[in-house]
Image: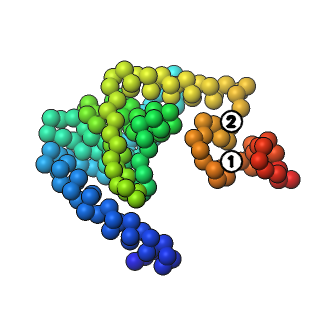
Amino acid sequence: QEVPWPVTRSLWHARIARAAEWFIDTELSRQPNITESATEVTGSLDLKDPPFRLVAKADRIDRLGDGTLAIYDYKSGAPPSKPQIKAFDKQLLLECLIVRWGAYEEIAQAEVSSATYIGFGSAPKTISVAPDEGELKQGLAELKELIAAYQDPAKGYLSRRAMEGVNYSGDYDHLARFGEWSLGGEGDE
C-alpha cells in the first residue's frame, strides 16, 4: 500500500500472492526444529593478516534443536544456482565465515548446518549449501588473497571483475572508462 507506483504495487502483489502458499508450506516444515531465530542480524569478522573487517547483515539465522545454525537469505527473484554460488555468489559463504570465526550480535557461535537462499521468483524455490570445514577454510583463504591483491598499489581496481552476465551499466563504469574500452559502445567524453 505504501509503494507510490500502482504498477509496481500490482506486480509485487502478484508475486507475493504467487509465492505465499509455497512459502507458508516450506516455513511450516522449518518451524518445528527452531529453538531461536533472529532477523536482520549484523555480524563481523576481523582479520589480522591482512587487516580487514568483514561485515554482513544476515536476513535470518535460526538455531536448530541440535544446536547448529541455519542461515537464510531471501531473494525477490530466483536464487542463484549451485554453479553460480560456487563461482560468483559468495554471500552465504561469507556469512558462514562470520558464524565460524567471527560473531553475530544476537546469535551465539555454533556450527552451521545449512545456508539457504529462499527465492520468491516466478518459480519459488530454495537452494541450500552447507559449507564444510574445508570449504570454509578455502573461502577464508580466497577472501584473504583477494584483499591482499587489492592492497597491492600496483593492482588496478576493475569496475567489472568476474561478471556473470550483467548487461546494465555498473556504478563505477565512468571511473573505469568502460564505454571507451568495451567493444560494443561509444565512450563518454
* Residue at point 71%, 32% (across, down): 156
Residue 148 on image: x %, y %:
59, 24
Q: Is residue 70 above or below residue 12?
A: above
Q: Position of residue 45 (x, y in %)?
A: 42, 33
Q: Could you tell me the amino acid type at mark 1?
A: Tyr
Q: Which residue is mark 2?
A: 157
State left or right for residue 183 relative to residue 95.
right
Residue 159 sits in quarter: top right
108 lies above or below 152: below
Nearer to me, 36 or 34? 34
Asked if marks 2 and 1 touch (Cβ < 8 Å), the reply is yes
| 135, above or below 166, in the image | above
Q: Residue 29's spot in the image, x, y percent?
A: 17, 50
Quadrant (top left, top right, bottom left, bottom right) of the N terminus? bottom left
Q: Secondary structure at mark 2?
A: loop
What is the crowding at mark 2: few (fewer than 14 residues within 10 Å), some, or many (at least 20)?
Answer: few
Extreme residue toward the right, this view: 189
Helix, strand or loop status at disc 1: loop
Q: Quadrant of residue 69?
A: top left
Q: What is the basis of the colouring in this image?
A: rainbow
Q: Nearer the viewer, residue 14 or 135?
A: 14
Sequence-earlier tag: 2 or 1? 2
Residue located at (78% from left, 50% from top): 185
Residue 102 percent coordinates (x, y):
37, 32
Q: Answer few, some or many: residues within 10 Å of disc 1's Cα (few below 14, many 20 plus, some between 14 and 19).
A: few
Identify residue for label 1. 172
* Tag of residue 186: none
In the image, what residue type sits under mark 2?
A: Tyr
Q: Residue at x 49, y 76 (%)?
A: 7
Give the distance between the C-alpha atoms of the residues marked 2 and 1, in whole angstroms. 10 Å
